[in-house]
């Protein structure tokens, strides 16, 4: 689903005059700020898992400027990026348009080497995915939209799901700060997160199945015992920390599109 359908434009927050007001947050083009070089040698799949846990994903490169930013990060050491052949696509699902293959790989589509690294001169080279290389992660806040509609947690989840998205998850301080900045542009005191507690076992989990690798609770992690407040909000009144509340309370919410 395109955000233009919601009356949003890339690169800014915008109120949209639709069924109810919305505010959109898109990724920025600041490549230096969103690329992180990890100088640990891993296979491509292990690097992908690392980036998805601690950042957003392996880096996707969409233009020459981003390719130059990636080259600057790697300190002359060839490193994995998020491109693989299945057929050719980026790990984070972005369209494969820009490319920068080495001259030796003019027939890249005919070989069996399926994962891609960027070399110290910025060229791309496909090699065996089991090779261990350093890698570049990206941390990107993408396609988040604030829905100014007072809803229970289940109603908010249902709305996002029907619109091919999910309730927002937060996996790093960068994402926490960006979502807080988005909420700060609204009049909402709290917004639902896609975070809830298992009624049977008591552990907290993101509804989109991302690992709970980052937490920002107002008073530390809540009890792991099953409780009567098994859903979570980001509270503007508490410096955008997370608070566990009853799922039947009503708040605005944020959907995130993949």
Image (cartoon, rainbow, N blue to C red):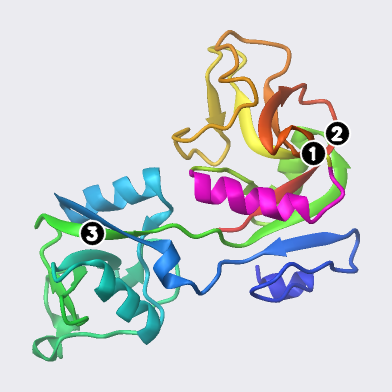
64 displayed left or right of 6: left
Whether residue 97 can be seen here? no
**Mark 2 / mark 3, whichever is N-terminal:** 3
Q: Residue at x 63, y 20 (%)?
A: 219
Q: Quadrant of the C terminus?
A: bottom right
Please tell me whether mark 1 or mark 2 is closer to you in this view. 2
Give the main secondary structure of the magenta stretch: helix
Give the Cα distance between marks 1 and 3.
40 Å
**Mark 1 / mark 2, whichever is N-terminal:** 1
* Res 234 quadrant in image: top right
Mark 1: give few (<14), some (14-19) or many (20+) Cα within 10 Å. Answer: some
Q: Residue at x 84, y 45 (%)?
A: 188
* Res 5 quadrant in image: bottom right
| Residue with the mark numbered 3 | 135
Contact check, label 2 and label 3, Cβ < 8 Å? no
Secondary structure beneath disc 1? helix
Note whether 165 is above or below 252 in the view shown. Answer: below
* Res 193 quadrant in image: top right
Secondary structure beneath disc 2? loop
Q: Quadrant of the N terminus?
A: bottom right
| Residue with the mark numbered 1 | 155
Q: Nearer the viewer, residue 221 or 62?
A: 221
| Residue with the mark numbered 2 | 250
Secondary structure beneath disc 3? strand
Instruction: Report the magenta residues as a range.
Output: 172-188
Give the Cα distance between marks 2 and 3.
42 Å
Looking at the picture, how far across and down is residue 18, in whole percent? 89, 66
Q: From this viewpoint, which residue is outermost toward the top?
A: 225
Q: Residue at x 31, y 47 (%)?
A: 49
Q: Is residue 70 magenta?
A: no
Q: Nearer the viewer, residue 13 or 199?
A: 13
Mark 3: give few (<14), some (14-19) or many (20+) Cα within 10 Å. Answer: many
């Amino acid at each position: 689903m395109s955000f233009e359908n919601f009356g949003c434009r890339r690169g800014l927050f915008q109120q949209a005059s639709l069924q109810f007001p919305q505010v959109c947050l898109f990724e920025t083009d600041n490549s230096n700020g969103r690329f992180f070089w990890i100088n640990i040698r891993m296979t491509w799949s292990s690097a992908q898992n690392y980036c998805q846990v601690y950042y957003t994903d392996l880096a996707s490169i969409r233009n020459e400027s981003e390719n130059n930013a990636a080259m600057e990060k790697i300190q002359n050491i060839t490193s994995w990026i998020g491109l693989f052949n299945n057929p050719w696509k980026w790990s984070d699902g972005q369209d494969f348009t820009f490319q920068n293959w080495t001259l030796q790989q003019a027939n890249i589509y005919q070989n069996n080497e399926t994962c891609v690294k960027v070399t110290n001169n910025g060229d791309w080279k496909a090699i065996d995915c089991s090779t261990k290389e350093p890698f570049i992660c990206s941390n990107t806040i993408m396609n988040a939209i604030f829905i100014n509609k007072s809803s229970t947690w289940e109603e908010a989840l249902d709305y996002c799901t029907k619109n091919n998205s999910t309730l927002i998850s937060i996996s790093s301080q960068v994402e926490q700060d960006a979502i807080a900045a988005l909420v700060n542009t609204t009049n909402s005191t709290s917004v639902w997160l896609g975070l809830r507690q298992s009624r049977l076992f008591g552990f907290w989990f993101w509804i989109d199945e991302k690992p709970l690798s980052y937490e920002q609770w107002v008073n530390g992690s809540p009890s792991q015992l099953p409780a009567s407040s098994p859903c979570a909000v980001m509270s503007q009144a508490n410096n955008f920390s997370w608070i566990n509340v009853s799922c039947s309370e009503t708040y605005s919410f944020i959907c995130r599109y993949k």
